[in-house]
Amino acid sequence: VTMDIVTYTGYKLKKWRGALISTVVFILPSFILMVILAMLYDKYSLTPKIAGILQCLGAAVTGLILSVALKLTKVEMKDYRELCVLIWAFASALIFKLDIVVIVGLCGLVGIVIYHDEPKKP
């Protein structure tokens, strides 16, 4: 959304040139930071202390993702059918190693089948 606002504002002020310049200026600091971090990672990732830090950070990020997933599950699961789809999608990714696009597509088809006769909710 922020990117859209930056580009739109640039366009309104100076047409295409303003949109291009505002977009580049918005993206450039993040791009430079990522290049610097990648260079630092390449240089120092094999040192024992940094490798240990990165391993713990990976575990922490995994824990945070799991925490968000559980919170989202509590909010979004409205009936047993959705729970069944969730369990199937999880098993399909973890056990059967199905591609995420296939899982999302199949879940969409399952949704059409199991919810086709229910009235739309506002």
Image (cartoon, rainbow, N blue to C red):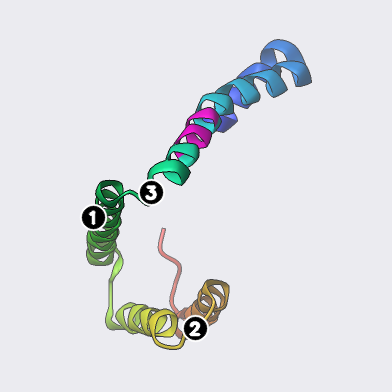
Q: In which quarter of the image is the C terminus?
A: bottom left
Instruction: State if disc 1 and disc 2 touch (CB < 8 Å).
Output: no
Determine whether, in the image, residue 94 is placed left or right of residue 36. left
Q: Which amino acid does label 1 sit on?
A: Cys
Question: Which segment is the magenta one?
Answer: 32-37
Question: Which residue occupies the extreme front position in the image?
Answer: 47
Q: What residue type is labelled 3?
A: Ser
Question: Which residue occupies the extreme top position in the image?
Answer: 13
Query: Which label sits on residue 56?
Result: 1
Residue at 30% x, 65% y: name it: 76
Query: Which label sits on residue 45?
Result: 3
* Residue position for label 2: 110
- Image x and y of residue 79, in percent: 28, 77
Task: Check disc 3 and report its element: helix, strand or loop.
Answer: loop
- Image x and y of residue 57, in percent: 27, 51
Disc 3 packing (10 Å; few <14; some 14–19; many ≥20): some
